[in-house]
Image: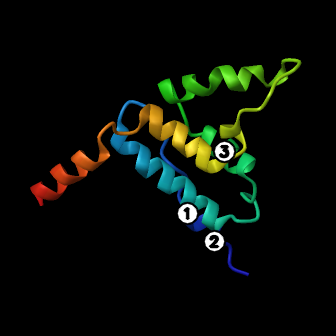
Amino acid sequence: GRDSSSKVRAPDPFDGSDPNKLKVYLISCQMVFRAQRQNCASGRKKIGYALTFLKGTALEFFEPYILAEDDPGYVEPIFFTDWIAFKQILLNNFGSTFPEEEAEMVLEKL
């Protein structure tokens, strides 16, 4: 069959500094997941992939959880196994605080 994975560009790294880039980063990740369904079937695989494109404060947020994985008694947080939860954590911490108002402002400029 046709190899669709080569057609999809990897996401640009997201460093947490620009809330407007978060949506682009998440959409880029989801485009890759759509193209590579067999490789990205589980939430854990999706999140593992998405984490490799985080840097700066966005990566620093997850570092304690990543480093704790080898600790005895480590309990994996839901946002490392559930893609929706992972997205929500990113949106809550690095997304726009007023998405509705910003959307209205953008529409008014058109």
Residue hosting label 2: 4
The alpha-carbon separation of the residues under discs 3 and 1 comes to 18 Å
Counting labels gives: 3
Q: Kindly identify which numbered label has been placed on residue 8.
A: 1
Residue drawn 77% across and 32% down?
A: 76
The image position of residue 91, as x and y in percent, is 46, 40
The reply to whether the C-beta atoms of the residues labelled 2 and 1 are less than 8 Å apart is yes
Question: Are there few (<14), some (14-19), or many (20+) residues within 10 Å of tag 3?
Answer: many
Note whether 96 is above or below 71 in the view shown. below
Q: Earlier in the sequence, mark 3 or mark 2?
A: 2
Amino acid type assigned to the residue bearing label 1 in the image? Val
Residue drawn 73% across and 81% down?
A: 1
Q: Nearer the viewer, residue 52 or 67?
A: 67
Residue drawn 56% across and 53% down?
A: 29
Amino acid type assigned to the residue bearing label 2 in the image? Ser
The image position of residue 105, as x and y in percent, is 16, 49
Q: Kindly identify which numbered label has been placed on residue 47.
A: 3
Amino acid type assigned to the residue bearing label 3 in the image? Ile
The alpha-carbon separation of the residues under discs 2 and 1 comes to 7 Å
Classify mark 2: helix, strand or loop: loop
Classify mark 3: helix, strand or loop: helix
Classify mark 1: helix, strand or loop: loop
